[in-house]
Image (cartoon, rainbow, N blue to C red):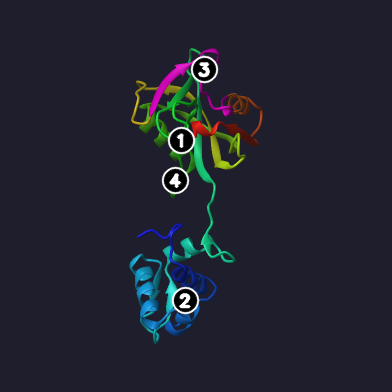
């Protein structure tokens, strides 16, 4: 069961209580939940089943957060009692071959279907930045390369009409060299080696491509933040 955005109010109350105390009794949790004993028991069982709280065996009915529960509840906005939506963390790989072409990827999934840009991928829990880059490169393109981290890029995408924030992403910028292997396509993307001129001829392109190329050519580690606007029908 997921508690990300649809958690019952009583369960969020219980999690908040245990976030702000080393332990709490059933009666304290019931008072916090504002429910009957039976209803409180139900919600506690759901949280125990999900691995967020545990019953302390050597006490008379005390409960505490598990390690999983601490990590989850620590993302809570304790005033609003909701789990805060956080920016996405990914890698973006700028890879150039010996012909001077850049690896570009056409996105064949929503959102931004049909858009061209550098290859990106999510950083998994526990991965280093370079581990994530190497894994994503191999999985999505079939290639390996020499990789190094050269900066960070914060990208904020807005609806051009309503000015609503669509995407909030932090990218670890990775420069790649000496690509090896046979370039392949995988589900959700099409990959090509393109010159900058050929890339600029594409109808749909992410505006961050030239900026990230400029960043990897800098003499020092670069951190940059930029906003972009997209038509709502493209998202």
Identify the mark nearer the N-term, 2 or 3.
2
Circle 1: element type: loop
Could you classify mark 2 by the number of other residues whose Cα lies within 10 Å: few (under 14), some (14-19), or many (20 or more)?
many
Disc 3 and disc 1 in contact, CB within 8 angstroms: no
Local crowd at mark 1 within 10 Å, few (<14), some, or many (≥20)? few
Q: Earlier in the sequence, mark 2 or mark 4?
A: 2
| Residue position marked by numbered label 1 in the rendering | 111
Closest to the camera, between mark 4 and mark 3, is 3
| Tag 2 near tag 3, CB within 8 Å | no
Q: Residue 11: give x, y in percent of width and height.
A: 44, 69
Q: Which residue is mark 4?
A: 127
The residue identified by callout 2 is 33
Image-based side of 199 in relation to 38, left or right: right
Residue 164 percent across, percent down from the top left:
59, 42
Q: Quadrant of the N terminus?
A: bottom left
Q: For this rendering, which residue is in front, 159 or 22? A: 159
């Amino acid at each position: 069961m997921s508690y990300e955005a649809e958690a019952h109010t009583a369960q969020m109350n219980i999690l908040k209580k245990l976030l702000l105390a080393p332990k709490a009794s059933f009666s304290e949790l019931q008072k916090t939940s504002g429910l009957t004993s039976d209803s409180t028991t139900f919600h506690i069982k759901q949280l125990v089943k999900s691995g967020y709280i545990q019953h302390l065996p050597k006490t008379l009915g005390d409960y505490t957060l598990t390690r999983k529960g601490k990590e989850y509840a620590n993302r809570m906005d304790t005033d609003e009692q909701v789990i805060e939506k956080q920016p996405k963390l990914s890698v973006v790989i700028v890879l150039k071959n010996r012909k001077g072409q850049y690896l570009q990827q056409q996105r064949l999934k929503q959102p931004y279907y049909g858009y061209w840009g550098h290859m990106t991928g999510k950083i998994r829990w526990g991965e280093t930045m370079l581990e994530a880059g190497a894994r994503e490169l191999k999985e999505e393109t079939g290639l390996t390369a020499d990789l190094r981290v050269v900066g960070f890029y914060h990208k904020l995408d807005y609806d051009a009409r309503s000015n609503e924030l669509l995407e909030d992403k932090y990218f670890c910028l990775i420069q790649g060299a000496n690509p090896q292997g046979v370039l392949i396509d995988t589900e959700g993307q099409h990959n090509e080696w393109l010159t900058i001129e050929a890339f600029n001829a594409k109808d749909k392109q992410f505006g961050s491509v030239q900026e990230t190329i400029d960043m990897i050519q800098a003499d020092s580690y670069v951190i940059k933040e930029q906003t972009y606007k997209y038509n709502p029908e493209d998202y």
